[in-house]
Amino acid sequence: MTIPSALDPAAAVRTALPDVLLDTVEFRGETTLVVARERIVEVATVVRDTPGLVYNFLSDISAVDYWEPYGGWGERPERFAVSYHLLSMLYKRRLRLKVYVPEDNPVVPTIIGIWPAANWLEREIHDLMGIYFDGHPDQRRLMLPDDWQGHPHRRDYPLGYETIMFSFNADEIMKHKPFAKE
Amino acid sequence: MGVISSKLGNLGIVTTTLDEAVNWGRTGAMWPLLFGLACCAIEYMSTQASNYDLARFGMELNRASPRQADLLIVAGRVSRKMAPVIRQLYDQMAAPKWVISMGDCASCSGVYNNYALVQGVDEVIPVDVYVAGCPPRPEQLIHGILTLHEKVRGDHIKEWAS
Amino acid sequence: MVLQTPEKTGEVYKWEGSVEELKGLVTERAITGETMLLNMGPHHPSTHGVLRLLLELDGEEIVSCLPDVGYLHTGIEKNMEHKTYEKCVTLTDRMDYLAPMSNNLAFCLAVEKLVDLDVPERAQIIRVICMELTRLNSHLVWLGTHALDMGAMSVFLYCFREREIILEMFEMLSGQRMMSSYIRPGGVWRDIPPEFMPALEKFLDYMPGKIDDYEKLLTNNPLWIDRTQGIGIIEPDVAMAWGVSGPSLRGSGVSWDIRKAMPYSGYEQYDFNVPVGEHGDVYDRFYVRILEMRESVKILGQALKRLTPKGPFRSDNRKFVPPPRSELGQSMEAVIHHFKLWTEGFSAPDEEVFVAIESPRGEIGCYLHGAGDNKPRRVHFKTPSFMHIAALPVMSKGHLIADLVGIIGSVDIVLGDCDR
């Protein structure tokens, strides 16, 4: 069995789907393909099935929030981004697909049909980052209780609610701390 | 009598107070609930295992059912999702019951001051002994257990029977 | 508990406890009441922590299994966004608490990639030693608890006896038994103490015999074989599709080890095998891990030969790594660097990197997005236990509920790793 030689992922995607690639970024040897949000399923199918790419293993899906007070999104088009980290076990290399997600309509098509592993990874992002995955079969929260409000990993969500206790304010906090009764 | 007295000799009589006899019994076989949350649970397992051998204090028997347990060792961080479960476990335990909050996370949520964690398990259940450390060494946990024993030895029947 | 949260940003899903809500997740027979819905956990002796499983049972047979995680959700990723890179290392320890050093290394490699920082060779050897000791440490806990779940009590006591020796070595290195935070961006925290190398040497002589002992207890034990062979089978292609990695994937016959395939920290210089299973059942996953422990001992022996007692243990790039104490008394520059690093930390570019390493459980990946200043914009960990719990329904389908305990044990889950 001969293994077809490895292809450049950007060029291969551009050949297969001409108008889908918005940008490519190279940083420290990592390739990022920024693709159109609506067409992530097509791109994922292409990079998985094209001989010479064969990104067969979904390593990770992670979301990032470029909220203004923390650096802001600057040149980036939208507030949120979802990154898909793919691994090709055959060619021993990684690829990142990235989609930008607008603040007012945070929805991305699900890729659960391509990699079942995306199931929980997408649920986690839905729960913690508030980005919804269209077509996902299980829309329950994953990490937090079902009655939780808000999405904690967004940068506009506060880190905590309770004042940190130091020796100077310990007495004050101890007065109000809701200690449990028997 | 026969066999026992010939082996042990004349056992004689020991005089003590009822308080002390009851508390001796309680400290001698305090069964912990088989319950672990996070990192501290691993150190708790180490305490149970060969090197530290918690059986020396009559605690080798972990009960998985809260109905049969006397001691709840909260070993690890308590998330807001877990807090109601812990309260329920505590409520299901039969009195007399004690709680050791093991580690910084359970005592005051340690290095995490954030949305997900209860800032100290004492907001959910009453705690008898706090053990510091992240995670505490087995020796520290044993010290916590001995401190609890001391506390139990100071109990009076009058106080809880009224 | 009333929480002051910001404006709710989307629809809030509420599970009121009605079976109707589970439509599509369990079979129709559960809705009509023909099969039984059973709740296992979050307080259960053999779920390795606080995992909750909603099981649909037909008699004793599992029809479907819905894992529910998050009982240990700690918000570590969110906390990291509010700390400098140096301080984040402390938090990574507490994710996968059986293999703290693996988390350290994944995060530190990501930081080093982000800021383009080189690590001296000797530091990499120390890191490899730490990684393999961590692997042994983690596998020992796994073996002990897995055997305990299946009813073999004595293995637990033996495993924890050996584990104490490893923890003592960690204490020599870092002063802490478990949460050592020993691996830092740019190298390791401090040089190895003089008593470490003799201790490791002694341990390497001692350990292989002990692994033989575990094998004597379990490998050919007919009871163990009955309980584990043919249970929890996952086919290689299914395993890959579900993101199963590490020894659990190798148990299915896929020879994929990041240490071998995409080496980091100089793993390409070590001679070791990647044990591979055949059937993908509980027994194969068990046996792969046992063989892996032997390989770890082998790597440790090679690393010990290469390790020199003295030499650099972290990078001397003063912009990212604090200067040694000896320099502080003589150099004004060193004082400034020290002050800057411990108050402000170093800045990283507004870019993203993803680094994955082979932890004892599988592929642990760190996605790190800098923000152009001293704190990360986003840290996300892809953790093996998370993927393995997601794949539990596939493995447990059609098995008896008693075997589920073995399956959970065999994929070696740590709930802190899963929930973060």
Image (cartoon, coloured by chain):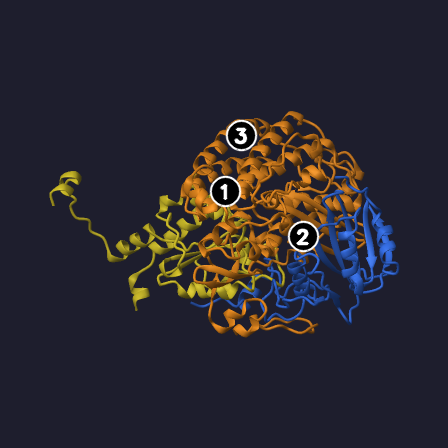
Chain colours: A blue, B yellow, C orange
Whole-Å distance between the Cαs marked 3 and 1? Answer: 19 Å
State the image coordinates of residue C152 (x, y, percent, origin top left).
42, 43
Res. C29 in view: yes
Whole-Å distance between the Cαs marked 1 and 2? Answer: 25 Å
Numbered badge on residue C143: 1
Q: Amino acid at mark 3?
A: Phe
Earlier in the chain: of badge 1 and badge 2, it is 1
Q: Nearer the viewer, mark 1 or mark 2?
A: 1
Quadrant, the C terminus of chain B: bottom left
- Image-quadrant location for residue C13: bottom right
Numbered badge on residue C43: none
Chain for numbered disc 3: C
**Callout 3 crowding tier (Cα within 10 Å): few <14, some 14–19, many ≥20:** some
Numbered badge on residue C203: 3
Whole-Å distance between the Cαs marked 3 and 2? Answer: 32 Å
Find numbered disc 3 in the image and state the secondary structure of the residue it sits on: helix
Tell me the residue that label 2 is attached to. C381
Q: Nearer the viewer, mark 3 or mark 1?
A: 1
Quadrant, the N terminus of chain B: top left
Which residue is drawn at the image coordinates 66% and 29% (left, top)? C271
Chain for numbered disc 2: C
- Image-quadrant location for residue C5: bottom right
Frontmost residue, A25 versus A149: A25
Tell me if label 1 and label 2 are in contact, CB under 8 Å.
no
Find numbered disc 2 in the image and state the secondary structure of the residue it sits on: strand
Co-location on one chain, circles 1 and 2: yes
State the image coordinates of residue C308 (x, y, percent, origin top left).
67, 26
